[in-house]
Image (cartoon, rainbow, N blue to C red):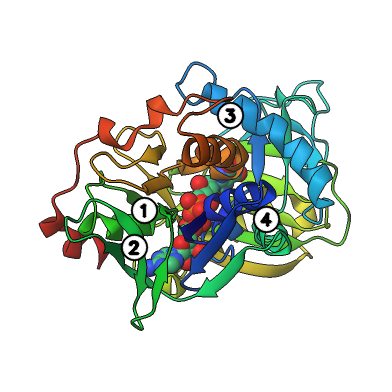
Amino acid sequence: MNIVICGAGVIGGALAYELSSRGTDVTVIERWKVGGCASGKSGGFLARDWCDGTPVAPLAQRSFNLHEQWAEALGNPYGYRKVDTYSGAKSVRRSLGSRGQNDLAAWLADDVVHRQQLGTPSTTAQLDPEAFTKALVDGAVKNGAQLKFGAVSGLLQTDAGTDVQGVTLEDGTRIEGDAVVLALGPWSLLAAQWLPLPPIYGLKGHSVIFKPKVALPPETIFAEFEDTDGEHLAPEIVPRANGTLYVCGLSGDDALPVDPARVLPEDGGCERLRRVSMSLVPQLADADVIAEQACFRPVTADGMPIVGAIDGYDHAYVATGHSVWGMLNAPGTAEALADLILTGETKQVDLSPFSPSRLAALDPSQLELRAS
Ligand SMILES: Cc1cc2nc3c(=O)[nH]c(=O)nc-3n(C[C@H](O)[C@H](O)[C@H](O)COP(=O)(O)OP(=O)(O)OC[C@H]3O[C@@H](n4cnc5c(N)ncnc54)[C@H](O)[C@@H]3O)c2cc1C
């Protein structure tokens, strides 16, 4: 059995690793770079119980546990570690009260108040997302998977059209397979031309990576920041095991370009994020800035992933829409989808809440506008 996986983000990479670890032949097709999109530019923050109370909770809990096992199996070249997680708030316009006696996250600026513990090392962790995604694809390749570069532009289907037997690439190449999985992140939208898929929206976010002169502790901060113009931002501050510090929390307005290589920061976006970061973390004043970047996370109409077989078609699957929890939920998604593809049922996590058919399919005539 050969499974064709479209997209080498964290979801495609995790599925390739899982399937190939079980001895299944896999071909991964990537248009641009492994982990070049949201999967390489996200916070890489993981939480066991932050999805509790939603249908995603079992997937998140299972995935959180799998992360620990996968880090061991893969040799952890991606800085997976357990962390404390705190909140904090700052306004540059008004006093938010005094910091009080607590000394949580002592490396934040003195005027960051409302510090509370949101997670402990048994409930929160982090990793370098680009290194993680690359480790998954490298692991899959070591297991025998093939990685091919090219833009998926259509499906190979039987005359009746309902049995999917591979994909075609923009250059005309045909890649045959026994099943096809669309793991194209927000670009899964393009596949609504070929299959009945609900709309997938791409929400843009900016991020900056610093290299501070001093090492910061294994702690993650979810801050609230009121800027000079009164706008409220929610920066996520992640000091990483490799000594860098990642900050995100500023959205963007651009539409999703069809070519992932054309996703760029918007004017002033990263500058503002840099200024906000330095106001929250004084050690960043003399830090080097090693990346200023933007990416789109894939979101569905009800905010939940779509993972499973596509109704009315044979051998066609989709796995996307993980929104702000794609890094967290990749292992559980891969495990459950591999079960479904290989055995027809899932063992650990029930995928039925994520069925693609729970949402109305997109009218393909709207597609050009959305993807341009
Ligand atoms: C700023 C930000 C911070 C985040 N922080 C966190 C976090 O802390 N924790 C967490 O769990 N999640 C976080 N996320 C969410 C997470 O990054 C995403 O949910 C996840 O990366 C989505 O992975 P994916 O594989 O579905 O999509 P992508 O990473 O977008 O991968 C899709 C791949 O498909 C490729 N592709 C596109 N078109 C084609 C084509 N035609 N043919 C072949 N390949 C193609 C792309 O090049 C890309 O490599 C964050 C997201 C953002 C934007």
Residue 69 visible in the current orientation: yes
Give the labeled residue for mark 2.
Answer: 256
Alpha carbon separation for disc pair 3 and 1: 22 Å
Residues at marks 4 and 2 touching, judged by CB atoms closer than 8 Å? no
Residue 358 image label = none
Q: Secondary structure at mark 4?
A: helix
Q: Secondary structure at mark 1?
A: strand
Residue drawn 59% across and 38% down?
335
Labels 4 and 2: the sequence-earlier one: 4
Residues at marks 2 and 1 touching, judged by CB atoms closer than 8 Å? yes
Alpha carbon separation for disc pair 2 and 1: 6 Å
Labels 2 and 1: the sequence-earlier one: 1
**In this picture, is 148 found above or below 218?**
below
The one nearer the camera, 327 or 181, is: 181
Q: Residues within 10 Å of mark 4 (few under 14, many from 20)?
A: many
Q: Residues within 10 Å of mark 2 (few under 14, many from 20)?
A: many
Give the labeled residue for mark 1.
Answer: 202
Q: Label 4 is placed on what type of residue?
A: Leu
- For residue 68, what is the image quadrant? top right
Labels 4 and 3: the sequence-earlier one: 3
In the picture, measured across the screen, residue 372 lies left or right of residue 98, that is: left
Residues at marks 4 and 3 touching, judged by CB atoms closer than 8 Å? no
Q: Label 2 is placed on what type of residue?
A: Leu
